[in-house]
Image (spheres, rainbow, N blue to C red):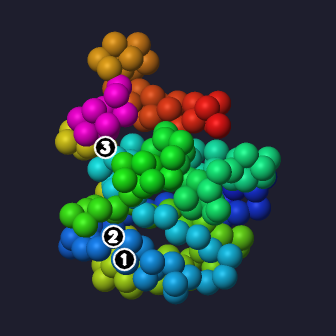
Amino acid sequence: MLKHLDEYRKFLEITGFQCGKIGVAKAFVDSICRELPKGVEVQLFDAYLVASWEHLYFAALNACAAFQTGRGISKNIAVETALYASSRRQIKRALEFIGVKPDTCSVAVLVLGADAASVKTALSMVTKRFGSEPEESILELSEEKKRIIRSAFAISNAELEAVSAADPDRGLVDLVIERVALLSTAL
């Protein structure tokens, strides 16, 4: 789904891919990044730790805001987005937590660029690299993903009950997004 971040003059694509195991994660990510059009950044995430497309959308918004105000701690918005998505302040810890690993087989992909055409071109290149078509359903919450996300983001039963009487899935997504937003207060 292509989104325009008006105030940051960026276009954002968030999708998912089902693939075989990644293998050497850094080499896989580097091979994608070498082929990107100028001005486009890509970040890959372990989809089992992504609480819907909104999770990555708000992480990207926070990353763009950090860069615009000079508060970014990484060298690029894609890595800054990983910091926010993981709700961790250290790049190494963030990537170890939410980045792809050798055994990752469900990948959430974020593509960020200055214009829609270059973002679409980059997504096409990523699609070719994965050898399969994007699958939006990978971003949805399954029972297994909910369990993994609750554990990984330390979301207690009490927290979930307090925010999600009517819709537990919505509550879980909101709590993860809250953790994303709280990182900016720690930087």
Residue at position x 68%, y 50% from top?
72
Report the amino acid beneath label 1. Answer: Phe
Instruction: In this rendered view, identify the residue nearer to me: 92 or 122.
Output: 92
**Nearer mark to the viewer, of 3 and 2:** 2
Quadrant position of residue 58: top right
Is residue 176 toward the left or the right of residue 59 in the image?
left
| Count of marks overlaid on the render | 3
Which residue in the protein does label 1 denote?
Answer: 28
Q: Is residue 148 magenta?
A: yes
Residue at position x 42%, y 48% from top?
93
Which residue in the protein does label 3 denote?
Answer: 141
Which residue in the protein does label 2 denote?
Answer: 25
- The stretch in magenta equals 146-155
- Asked if the residue at tag 2 contacts the one at tag 1, i.e. Cβ–Cβ closer than 8 Å, the answer is yes
Residue at position x 73%, y 53% from top?
67
Q: Is residue 9 magenta?
A: no
**Nearer mark to the viewer, of 3 and 1:** 1
Indicate whether 1 appears above or below 117.
above
For label 2, the crowd category at 10 Å Cα-Cα, with few meaning under 14, some 14 to 19 and many 20 or more, is some
Indicate whether 94 appears above or below 42.
above
Residue at position x 21%, y 39% from top?
143
Report the amino acid beneath label 3. Answer: Leu
